[in-house]
Image: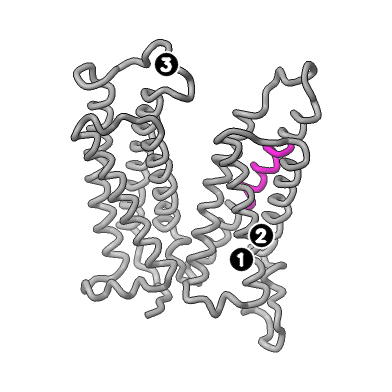
Amino acid sequence: MSVSSGYHLDVSAVFSPRGVARVCQLTLGCTIVSLVIHSAGYSATYGTFCMAVWTSCFALSAVVLVLEVTRLQTSLPVSWENLTVTLASLATLLLLTASVAYPAFFVRANDCPYNNCEVRNFRIAVSVCSWVACIAYGTEVFLSRAKAGRSGSYMATTPGILKVAQIFVGCVIFALLTDRTDFKWHAATLYCAAVFGVCLSGTVLLVALVVSGRSAAIRILRMPFERLAVIYTFAAVLLYVSAAVLWPVFCFDRKYGAPLRPQGCPRGKCSWDVKLAVAVMSFVNLALYIADLVCSHRSRPAAQPSRV
């Protein structure tokens, strides 16, 4: 702590650069939720998702700031630096998604002057505030990366942040698979779904070990955590290469599926669209795993604060 131990509250948690970023997050989160409830509104699945993102990020930022100001985070059985940067990275990705989805589905140029211009203006304000909030969370991640060397925070390094992105994309893929996708027709697409699940579970396990402060527990395997992470990432790259090749073949080849979008397939309810989205996201995650492997291989192991 940068303040004297004689004080019960840590004022630097508010006035430090990361503290200022969190105060901005809270201010913007409160503004967004208030605007949506007051007049902007939301509906359907996409609107509910955006509202869930904004309220969740606001609540998490409030909890983090309160715990740091009261110094209660020191009594938690977790690696606090790793936990906060993980939450900030995830919030950045979620807010980025909400900032794109909300204006795409709820802001229309032809809503005015024929309809209520006030509602449209409120929705534009919500979209702008959401983008600014995304920048605020991204700033916290950047500031955490700047002090990663001093704090020994693995999740603030490039491999750590990439793992959060891999989890996010993996969850998006599974959300797509559960939405009108007939992938169970072929053994190859079932294999692809299994690959997505195994890689997602493995990455979540690695992040959980780091955040819980128990990465030293893998010493029973007689190797440091960083080496285990590199070996796992290499295996994930091989698995994702096979899935990224098999999925398009068995979904879009004429022998197994439809190479072109079927005519009359309703927008938002078309299985072909979902398959295409899964194919794109699988290549995105493959690129993330490859980048993770390269960065992990080239980086030197950082000191890990551990809790046995």
Contact flag, marks 3 and 2 (Cβ < 8 Å): no
Give the residue drawn at x 74%, y 48%.
Answer: 31
Q: Secondary structure at mark 3?
A: loop
Contact flag, marks 2 and 1 (Cβ < 8 Å): yes
Residue on which disc 1 sits: 64
Q: Secondary structure at mark 1?
A: helix
Give the left or right position of residue 125, taking residue 2 as reference.
Answer: right
Query: Is residue 245 something that shows in the picture?
Result: no
Give the left or right position of residue 116, taking residue 43 as reference.
Answer: right
Q: Locate residue 300, reporting x and y percent.
A: 35, 65
Q: Amino acid at mark 2?
A: Arg
Residue on which disc 3 sits: 265
Position above or below: 276 against 177 = above
- Between disc 2 and disc 1, the foreground one is 1
Q: Locate residue 108, reporting x and y percent.
A: 67, 23
The residues tagged by marks 3 and 1 sit, at their Cα atoms, a distance apart of 45 Å
> Is residue 133 or residue 254 the one in the foreground?
254
Give the residue drawn at x 45%, y 55%.
Answer: 161
Disc with the residue nearer the chain's start (3 vs 1): 1
Q: Locate residue 295, reporting x and y percent.
A: 36, 54
Residue on which disc 2 sits: 22
Give the residue drawn at x 63%, y 48%.
Answer: 54
Q: Residue furthest top?
A: 263
Position above or below: 8 against 65 = below
Q: Give the residues in magenta.
A: 125-136
